[in-house]
Image (tube, grey):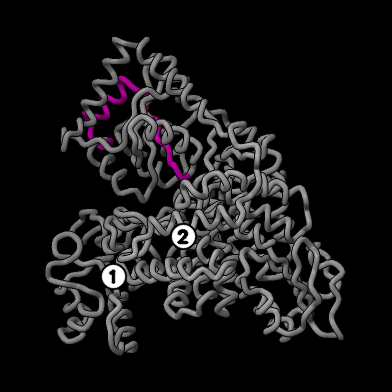
Amino acid sequence: MPNRLAHETSPYLLQHADNPVDWWPWSAAAFEEARRRGVPVLLSVGYSSCHWCHVMAHESFEDAATAELLNEHFVAVKVDREERPDVDAVYMEAVQAATGQGGWPMTVFLTPDAEPFYFGTYFPPEPRHGMPSFGQILDGVRNAWADRRDEVGEVAGRIVADLAGRSLTGALPADRRPPGPEELHGALMGLTREFDAVHGGFGGAPKFPPSMVLEFLLRHYARTGSAGALEMVQATGAAMARGGIYDQLGGGFARYAVDATWTVPHFEKMLYDNALLCRTYAHLWRATGSDLARRIAVETADFMVRELRTDQGGFASALDADSDDGTGKHVEGAYYVWTPEQLRAVLGDEDAEFAATCFDVTEEGTFEEGASVLQLPDTEGPVDAERVASVKRRLLAAREERPRPGRDDKVVASWNGLAIAALAETGAYFDRPDLIQAATDAADLLVRVHMDWHARLHRTSRDGTPGANSGVLEDYADVAEGFLTLASVTGEGVWVEFAGFFLDTVLLQFTAEDGSLYDTAADAEALIRRPQDPTDNATPSGWTAAAGALLSYAALTGSGLHRDAAERALGIVTALAGRAPRFIGWGLAVAEAALDGPREVAVVGPQGDPATVALHCAALLGTAPGAVVALGAPGADEVPLLQDRPLVDGQPAAYVCRHFTCERPTTDPEELTERLRG
């Protein structure tokens, strides 16, 4: 019989709806039930494309004996971290503080007042590698709750007090200035020390795509001409694009590589990674003209539209790592890996040998059971591009016949904001109006489905129906960023207006008196701690994403209020630039924009006029850090940057400004390009 999760919309929660565990969704009613029964709460947090979440579900949550123990002695609460990043953040902070590490599935035991007292991540069904079994954990917690209740309460109280003391509000330096050239150079030096000069990227295994750091390095190169900054971007971009983390047949990036060489990925594909990396490669092409960067940007954009676009025009969250291997068994990577025998079955002996060499497929394999993850080594000598393309087409067609990975078709507002920005720019750079239309359709969905009459955002939707969860800071910030980018590309000022609504909510609901930012709104559900984190994780932090959107909006509108808020928010980047540059990459990128102005570009001319189009393209392709672009016909006033900008001798013109103080206008696209070099 289905449990309470059968009434939820989250694909992850629905995956657990037929468990014998009597799951509750996160709700006041669940904690009231724990109080009524006098039992602790088991909080299990995961997400649909999480491999080890599925493993623990099969091993433990589908097991009748484990479920019986859970149901008798606990109230079990299941949370989709992508729907409730606030719940995830609060308890993950506790897990990391207590154990020194974190991850998913996250397993936390709580009092009926939601106070945590015991933590972990994945627990096996039997003791393994020094880890206790999940059953042993349940017995231990049950006995402690029954026999040492006061001690459990004291532990929970200390943990909550420690978390409360971690607030950044009021604890930041009085000098809240944005980073200057010295701090940004210090960040560059820190990144240089952590750079993997052999394999690209930063640090060792596991290795995650450092998209936000790469954006900072590109902007730093544009401003300073630092060859070292550009070299780190180029080396990392090439290594990822040629490695197994990139899908050499279908495009798009996996979540991360389990090794330091980008060879073997953890195979789930997330919307946010692909949106961020699509934009990064597009910007790398803009800076260098790299054919490889262009190809990866376009292929990644096409992957998002082909594989993740929903019927309503938004973008789904993720594709699973696991899929049926053809025998009914779900195996990680089964959809993506190849053996020499499989190549021969599709291509014949001669082309299979060519493909094996081209994509580094060996008898020994690079993955499990002799299978290989396709890579594209940078070989010397001429490449038969036509033959490579033919092989890729046939392998991709054969792969389409395999059982496909599951898709989490939940639409997350913030991740769709990132996708809108990436698709709009990629479409504009490479003359792909279909990508711009896909970005516009997603923006329309966010307005129609995710936004209410008070300009408040729902974090998620599914099948065109909004979820019950309110947007968090990253939703407002990333959607505003996406809308501002879409406005620059399309010239439709309405997107600037919508962005302004969302950023006003940031100022009213998420901003403390000292300018620091909370991840949740002032009127959101109260948790044991109000989460607040300025550092990047897999996506830009809500804090620094808001700073970036506020800065761009101020540049388009002349709003001193939004400019001041952006600069105050960047104060945290000044404090962290030298100490943790890998984890504040987006903040560093925004700081580069602030230091450059950012430059404000108003392009005025009749819509569709070839001269207007040429100036607009030159403006969008300018590499000045964080430059904003407004496009409009003569007399347009939807965006303040466009106001009082006449044609020049009857010709379309571009105005390059800083803080609304402008240079003389130009009608020459080449001159505009020169003015917008970093």
Q: Check if residue 312 falls in the magenta segment.
A: no
In the foreground, 74 or 501: 501
Q: Check if residue 73 falls in the magenta segment.
A: yes
Q: Is the residue marked by circle 2 packed among few (<14), some (14-19), or many (20+) residues within 10 Å?
A: many
The quarter of the picture where residue 662 lies is bottom right
Checking the image for residue 401, the label placed there is 1
Which residue type does callout 2 highlight?
A: Ser
In the foreground, 266 or 5: 266
Q: In the displayed structure, would residue 7 be above or below residue 432?
A: above
Circle nearer the viewer, 2 or 1: 2
Regarding residue 535, the answer to whether it shows in the image is yes
Residue 629: x, y in percent? 70, 68
Range covered by the magenta-colored residues: 61-82
The quadrant the C terminus occupies is bottom right
Checking the image for residue 512, the label placed there is none
The quarter of the picture where residue 626 lies is bottom right
Which residue type does callout 1 highlight?
A: Glu
The quadrant the N terminus occupies is top left
Residue at 30 percent of width and 63 percent of height: 262
Q: Which residue has dot 2 on it? A: 211
Q: In terms of secondary structure, where does tag 1 sit? A: loop
Residue 240: x, y in percent? 36, 67
Residue 558 left/right relative to 371: right
Q: In terms of secondary structure, where does tag 2 sit? A: helix
Residue 155: x, y in percent? 38, 18
Residue 123 left/right relative to 458: left
Residue at 54 percent of width and 75 percent of height: 286
